[in-house]
Amino acid sequence: MKSLIKIEELAMFLFAGFLFWTTDFAWWWFPALLLLPDISMVGYAINNKTGAYLYNIAHHKGLALMVYIVGYFLGFATIELIGIILFAHSSMDRLFGYGLKYIDSFKNTHLGKIGEV
């Protein structure tokens, strides 16, 4: 099952790359911004609960799609870009086994424990 999930997440990451390619932004914006959503981990400096909530909001694919759609329909390319980056980053994280977090521990995710086979 994990291989199937990884293939699905890779496909979504590549789709995000395609969406980015349809924008007018220079290619280097994609890799430059790709890790930016991980700023949400700053919440873990407060406590696990705050960290998990902030992380999960920044890594929620539904939110990423909503941001992209709003940007698309309002004609704001920067908002579209934010949605694409959020979606691509979330797919990349899940491809590497980093899922949405439970509040008890950073390593406890909806995909299982980070670092355990």
Image (tube, rainbow, N blue to C red):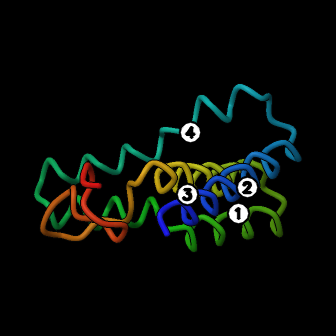
Residue shown at the point (54%, 49%) measured from the top left: 92
Looking at the rendered structure, the secondary structure element under dot 1 is helix
Q: Which residue is mark 2?
A: 80
The mark that comes first in sequence, 2 or 3, is: 3
Q: Residues within 10 Å of mark 1 (few under 14, many from 20)?
A: many
The mark that comes first in sequence, 1 or 2, is: 1
The percent coordinates of residue 16 (x first, y second) are: 72, 52
Residue shown at the point (27%, 54%) measured from the top left: 114
Residue shown at the point (64%, 63%) measured from the top left: 8
**Residue 6's disc number:** 3
Going by the numbered disc 1, the residue's amino acid type is Tyr
Q: Residues within 10 Å of mark 2 (few under 14, many from 20)?
A: many
Going by the numbered disc 3, the residue's amino acid type is Lys
Give the label, 1 or 4, closer to the camera.
4
Mark 4 and mark 3: Cα distance apart in space = 18 Å
The mark that comes first in sequence, 4 or 3, is: 3
Q: Which residue is mark 1?
A: 68
**Residue 34's disc number:** 4
Going by the numbered disc 4, the residue's amino acid type is Leu
Marks 1 & 2, CB-CB < 8 Å contact:
yes
Going by the numbered disc 2, the residue's amino acid type is Glu
Viewer-nearest residue: 5 or 69: 5
Marks 2 & 4, CB-CB < 8 Å contact:
no
Marks 1 & 4, CB-CB < 8 Å contact:
no
Mark 2 and mark 3: Cα distance apart in space = 25 Å
Residue shown at the point (29%, 55%) measured from the top left: 117
Looking at the rendered structure, the secondary structure element under dot 4 is loop
Give the label, 4 or 3, closer to the camera.
3
The mark that comes first in sequence, 2 or 4, is: 4
How many numbered marks, from 0 up? 4
Viewer-nearest residue: 72 or 95: 95
Give the label, 1 or 3, closer to the camera.
3
